[in-house]
Amino acid sequence: MPVFIALARARAWRSAWSAGWGASVVKRAALVGCAAALAACHPGNLPGAPGARDLKLSGSTDAAPAENEAIGNGAVKIGLIVPLTGPSGPSSVGASLRNAAKLAYADSGANDVTILVKDDRSTPAGAAAATQAAINEGAEIILGPVFGAGVKEASRVARAANKPMIAFSTDASAATRGSYLLSFPVEGYVDRGVNFASQRGKKSIAALVPENDYGTVAMAQFQQSAANYGVRVPVIERYKPGAPADSVKRLAAARDQFDALFIPEQAEAMTAVSKELVANGIDSKKVQIFGTGLWNDARTLSLPALQGAWFTAPENAGFNAFAQRYKAKYGADPARVATLAYDAVSLAIALSRSQGSQRYSENVLTNPSGFNGADGVFRFRSDGGNDRGLSVLEIGGGAAKIISPAPRNFTGNGA
């Protein structure tokens, strides 16, 4: 099984060994770097954040990107495909991903790998070309790209060369065997929420779902999870974004049929939803309301109807520790997605040192014990999807507190 990554600091080594990693390297893996905890910060903005879909890149005042930059000069080649440029010029998000990769390389003390940084220019064709260029230069594994359409094109190239990929999109349709997603798909948040609600005795859960792509994906997972956990679904109301009034009224009329209400809506839209909930006498004092990581936002935490509501999200400690170190090195805050590049590069370096010729094989990458990184515990499934450790938080007084911690491994449910 994959081994943990060794940082230059002896304290990191001692921490890893004392946790049992060194004694069972054939069973478990850990990435030692930032704190081994999950994170969420402004979740609707970036693809690595809870529940977010593919992002649009903003411009940056950074210097023009180096299209063929290499980090290190070791024998093991790792391709990193990132959107260094977008429609309006250099991308701050792409630069943040590249900087996170540099930080991971420095933290690992690596001198035996080369990270081949390639700009996909934020297009599917660019992702395919960048992937091919990295493979031509000897890359054994491809990390990235970010956008779902680009992942699909890059995956096609990587499969043809029999090279695995760890991509950063939340588009579950981009996941395939050998092309793994290191992201926070909405499905995981929904399943964790329904599971927790059932554990807390909720037997009948209604849903209020926006008519958009996010809502459709969340609703499908909600129905599947409800069936898995033996929860009844008496009513699902869908509404056009920004117009929840009629759907909420129908929910209120069926109030005696459910003891919990699931709302997979983004933070900026929850003001209008909350207003209708209050007007129709629905709040978390009378029925347990819960949502996804999109609610980890100040605009949502202060809403009257949601005081006492739950949402699922990663914990903040890992990202906060990473962000502090990133800012100390680069003088700016990282994009939320940056931890995906950090963890992917850290993992690739760790495996290069421990697994010999099998370092990026399917058996190694899909080990059921998983890995532990800046964004907490994760593992890849054979279908290319992933499982993430998530916490459940409760809203109260304009803030959120953890009421069910994220699991630290995959031997328990984390509840």
Image (cartoon, rainbow, N blue to C red):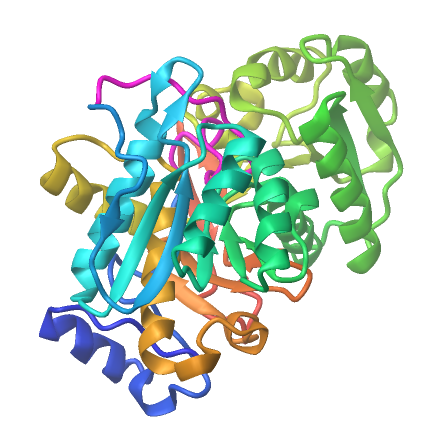
**Count of all numbered marks drawn on residues in the image:** 0
State the image quarter where residue 397 is shown: top left
The relative height of residue 28 versus residue 249 in the rendered view (above or below) is below
The x and y percentages for residue 390 are 50, 53
Point out residue 332 in the picture as x, y percentages from the top left corner. Answer: 17, 30
The residue at the far front in this view is: 136
**Which residue occupies 81% across, 50% down?**
224
Using residue 163 as the reference point, say whether residue 278 is left or right of it: right
The region drawn magenta spans 41-62
Left or right: residue 215 versus residue 387 is right
Relative to 346, 120 lies left or right: right
Q: Quadrant of the C terminus?
A: bottom right
Q: Residue at x 71, y 54 (%)?
A: 198
Is residue 311 something one can see in this rendering? Answer: yes
Image vertical order of residue 184 relative to residue 210, above or below: below
Q: Main secondary structure of the magenta part?
A: loop
Residue drawn at point x = 49 percent, y = 47 percent? 131
Percent x, y of residue 177: 67, 61
Q: Is residue 354 left or right of residue 155?
A: left
Q: Is residue 50 visible?
A: no
Of 158 and 379, the residue lying toward us: 158
In magenta stretch: residue 90 = no
- Most foreground residue, 108 or 65: 65
Query: Quarter-wise, where is residue 265 in the image?
Result: top right
Nearest to the observer: residue 113 or residue 234? 113
Residue at coordinates 35% horizontally, 81% vertically from top-left? 354
Q: Position of residue 242 (x, y in %)?
A: 67, 9
